[in-house]
Each structure stands twice: as structure tokens, then as C-alpha cells.
Image (spheres, rainbow, N blue to C red):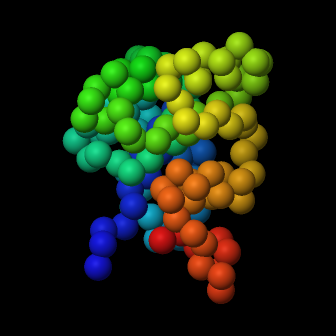
Amino acid sequence: MADKPRILVVDDAPLIVKLLAKHLEADGLTVPTATDGYEALTKARAESPDLILLDVILPKLNGYEVCTMLKQDTRHQKIPIVMLTAKAQEKDERLGKDCGADVYLRKPLRIQPLLEQIRTLLGATPNPADPQALP
């Protein structure tokens, strides 16, 4: 049996981390978490997640900096990064794309569109019996 996909959740708001982890774990995913930019880099490098959900506004290093550093590192540049942020201006989204984010989603989030983005980025197809389930 293949290992469960690993989704690194990075946000400095404990409630958001808890809620995202709960939904993702319910769908059979492994969910390491981080609450600041340095911890995000450390966990991404140590755990090689299949995908990263990354907030922009973080202590120590912001999400743009974390994304840029990972995308410049040949060992981690292919990890899809979904930026989740309250920063909703066009220039913010452009910065996210410029640093290498694959998807830029604005908070507040709806879980279903997020799960669909994750499925797409992981190349997964939903189970027809359970459209919420991830592989």
C-alpha cells in the first residue's frame, strides 16, 4: 500500500491549522503542521510533503519568502504550493504567483473548493461513492 499523501499546513492561527488538519486527516491524508516561516522550511525540507498549504502572513519569514526559497531549491521545487491568505488585492496574488505558488486562494476558505484544488494538484480523482474523499 502506498503511503498517504502528506499535506504540510502552515498558518500562524491555531484554529485554522486545527480545522484544516481535521478535514484533511478525515480524508486520509497525513498532515504535519507549522506555525511560522522557519518551521515551515524546516518541516518541508525534513518531511518532503506532497503539497503545502501556506499562509502569507507568518512570523519570522512570510509565505512569499518561504515559497521562493522552496521553489529555488531543486529538491523541493516541484512540491505544489497553495497560498491561503487574507491578502486579497491583485498585487498580492501576483506576488504569490511570482514567487512560485501554484494556486492562490483567499480567506475565508470553503473546504470543498480547497479539496478540489488539492485533488487536482495531487493528480487524484475522487471516489465516486464519496466525492469528498481524497486518495
Q: Residue at x 60, y 45 (%)?
A: 16
The image shows residue 73, relative to residue 117, as above or below, that is: above
Residue 22 can be seen, yes or no: no
Q: Is residue 114 left or right of residue 35?
A: right
Which residue shows up at 35% across the image and 33% down it? 77
Task: Work out whether 78 lies above or below 71.
Answer: below
| Percent coordinates x, y for residue 116 in the rendering | 65, 58
Q: Position of residue 83 (x, y in %)?
A: 58, 34
Total numbered circles? 0
* Camera-nearest residue between 46 and 94: 94
The answer to which of 26 and 71 lies nearer the viewer is 71
Q: Nearer the viewer, residue 119 or 92?
A: 119
Residue 57, relative to residue 125: is it above or below?
A: above
Looking at the image, can residue 1 be seen?
Answer: yes
The residue located at (70%, 28%) in the rendering is 86
Residue that sits furthest to the bottom in the current view: 129
Q: Residue furthest top?
A: 91
Where residue 80 sits in the image (x, y, percent)? 46, 41
Going by the image, does 102 lie left or right of 33? right
Question: If the image is split into quadrants, where does the N terminus sit?
Answer: bottom left
Q: Residue at x 44, y 47 (%)?
A: 51
Apparent side of residue 52 relative to residue 32 in the rendered image (left or right): right
